[in-house]
Image (tube, helix red, strand yellow):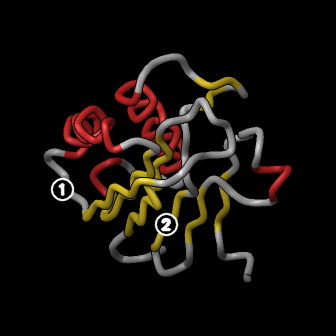
Amino acid sequence: MTDSVKRVSSGGPWEEKIGYSRAVELPNGLALVAGCTSVVGGQISAGGPYEQAITSFQVAFEALEELGLGREDVVRTRMYITHARDVEEIGRAHKELFDDVRPAASMIIVSGFIDPSLVVEVEVEVEAYRAGAR
């Protein structure tokens, strides 16, 4: 890829080990944010599904901010969850953050994550789009 692709690192524990960027913005304005969990400062934040979802989205928002984008620019979210019983709590967190934005959204039940104490991972793949690309 060319130098016009902008990459953001959050310093998360798996970025260096696995070889990925927290966020990538293409020259056409498309911004993608990798899956985000409630890991902050190398530690999983305390809390249940709602709190983990809020923290996961905050991690994604911080990456977007480094690209000059915000919550209002998000056009798609994906929430991967380990238990159907958590749909309402994670959905409540999503609604609080995006009710006025209304991105396309998916919630997918998966068998687990890299750390078994995580119950949600969000991809605020945040396909976000910057109109009038740079």
**Distance between mark 2 and mark 1 Cα atoms:** 17 Å
Task: Identify the residue shown where x is 76% and y is 46%.
Answer: 14
**Label 2 vs label 1, nearer the camera:** 1
For marks 2 and 1, the one nearer the N-term is 2
- Nearest to the observer: residue 68 or residue 96: 96
Residue 81 rendering spot, x and y as whole percentages: 43, 46
Q: Residue at x 40, y 24 (%)?
A: 51
Look at label 2 and name its amino acid: Ala
Q: Which residue is located at x 39 percent, y 31 percent?
A: 54
Q: Is residue 54 left or right of residue 92?
A: right
Q: Is residue 78 above or below residue 62?
A: below
| Secondary element at tag 2 | strand
| 2 and 1 marks in contact (CB < 8 Å) | no
In the image, residue 47 sits, relative to residue 91, either above or below, namely: above
Q: Quadrant of the N terminus?
A: bottom right
Judge by depth and name the residue closer to the eye, 60 or 88: 88
Q: Quadrant of residue 96?
A: top left
For the residue pair 54 and 4, the one nearer the viewer reads as 54
Q: Residues within 10 Å of mark 2 (few under 14, many from 20)?
A: many
Q: Which residue is label 2 attached to?
A: 31
Task: Judge whether 38 appears above or below 125 on screen.
Answer: above
Relative placement, left or right, of 117 versus 62 is right
Amino acid residing under circle 1: Arg
Residue furthest to the left: 100
What residue lies at 46% left-to-right and 18% top-to-bottom? Answer: 47
Q: Which mark is residue 102?
A: 1
Q: Number of callouts in the render?
A: 2
Determine which quarter of the picture holds residue 11. top right
Residue 99, x across and y down, in percent: 15, 45
Classify mark 1: helix, strand or loop: loop
Q: Position of residue 41 (x, y in %)?
A: 69, 25
Q: Position of residue 107 (x, y in %)?
A: 33, 55
